[in-house]
Amino acid sequence: MAGDNAAVKVKIDQVIKTYQTRTSENIALNGISLEIKENEFVTVVGPSGCGKSTLLNIIAGLLEPTSGKVYVDGKPVEGPGPERGVVFQQYALFPWLTVLKNVEFGLNLQGIPREQAKQEAMKYIKMVDLESFVNAYPKELSGGMKQRVAIARAYAVNPQVLLMDEPFGALDAQTRTQLQTELLNTWEKEQKTCFFITHDVDEAIILGQKVIIMSARPGRIKEIVDIKIPYPRTQETKMEPEFLALKNYIWSQVYQEYLAVRK
């Protein structure tokens, strides 16, 4: 968990991203600067089209900024790297591989010996409570199970930074709540730097130490809200007055941006 004196893990420095169309230039991100500390859990909210996913893809090295830079541990991001793990809303599992083989995949790419890779994969499969499904294929799993496999696979390669783009967005409310709890428990044990995009303000507050509110396009950081609610947090935390006050405030800020897009 990030303390006040923690080192900066991810630095986003004046990132601009534009897309050229045949008739105009579309500005997706307009001068984003942000520092994320080691082991800090940052959540990001904002209206659709404000550039949240674009920013995550730039941090992941899957997109290049038009200008500006992203640094991890002081080194510029110049493409994907093993120190950054990504979990998308779409499960992105290999349908022809079992749960075990999906989680082992990144370890095999790293050249880790077969038995060691299996042990590491099993550790994280157990962490997400899927050890009885190790030989199942993705088509045999529910949506929540598939996302657990994706999270286990991201953790297994031991990234320093976890980038999560609405990983629970396609799930039903009960499964989503369960996975929020599991993710919090895992983060408190494993101590990763997390950058988590969501449309759900409740989810942003229950998970994050900071909530980044992004403005309507072109995407900018409108406000950073510190969440002082102590961990461990549970679903009962959502009923507390402090939580409800934060929810009302953050939702009102996001809704203002939504209205700005509609005008």
Image (spheres, grey):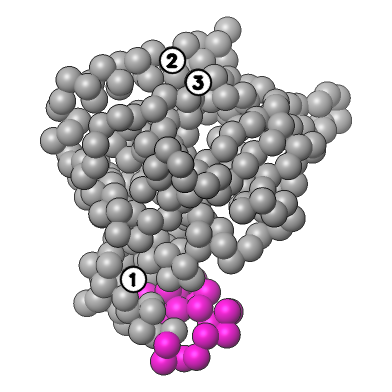
Residue 53 in the image: state x and y as whole percent.
57, 40
Please name the residue that numbered disc 1 is placed on. Answer: 124
Q: Amino acid at mark 1?
A: Tyr
Residues at circles 3 and 2 in contact by the CB criterion of under 8 Å: yes
Answer few, some or many: residues within 10 Å of disc 1's Cα (few below 14, many 20 plus, some between 14 and 19): many
The number of numbered discs placed on residues in the rendered structure image is 3
Could you say which disc has been placed on residue 149 in the image? none
Please name the residue that numbered disc 3 is placed on. Answer: 223
Residues at circles 2 and 1 in contact by the CB criterion of under 8 Å: no
Structural distance between the alpha carbons of marks 2 and 1: 37 Å
Residue pushed farthest front? 5
Please name the residue that numbered disc 2 is placed on. Answer: 253
Residue pushed farthest top? 263
Mark whose residue sits in front, 3 or 2? 3
The first of marks 1 and 3 along the sequence is 1
Q: Amino acid at mark 3?
A: Glu
Can I make out residue 137 in this image?
A: no
Q: Nearer the viewer, residue 139 or 170?
A: 170
Answer few, some or many: residues within 10 Å of disc 3's Cα (few below 14, many 20 plus, some between 14 and 19): few
Residue 104 sits in quarter: bottom left
Q: Nearer the viewer, residue 217 or 67?
A: 67
Q: Label 1: state its secondary structure.
A: helix
Q: Amino acid at mark 2?
A: Gln
Residue 108 in the image: state x and y as whole percent.
53, 82
Structural distance between the alpha carbons of marks 1 and 3: 35 Å
Magenta residues span: 94-116
Establish if 44 lies above or below 96.
above
Does residue 103 show up magenta in the picture?
yes
Mark whose residue sits in front, 1 or 3? 3
Establish if 113 lies above or below 70.
below
Residue plotted at (39% across, 85% down): 118
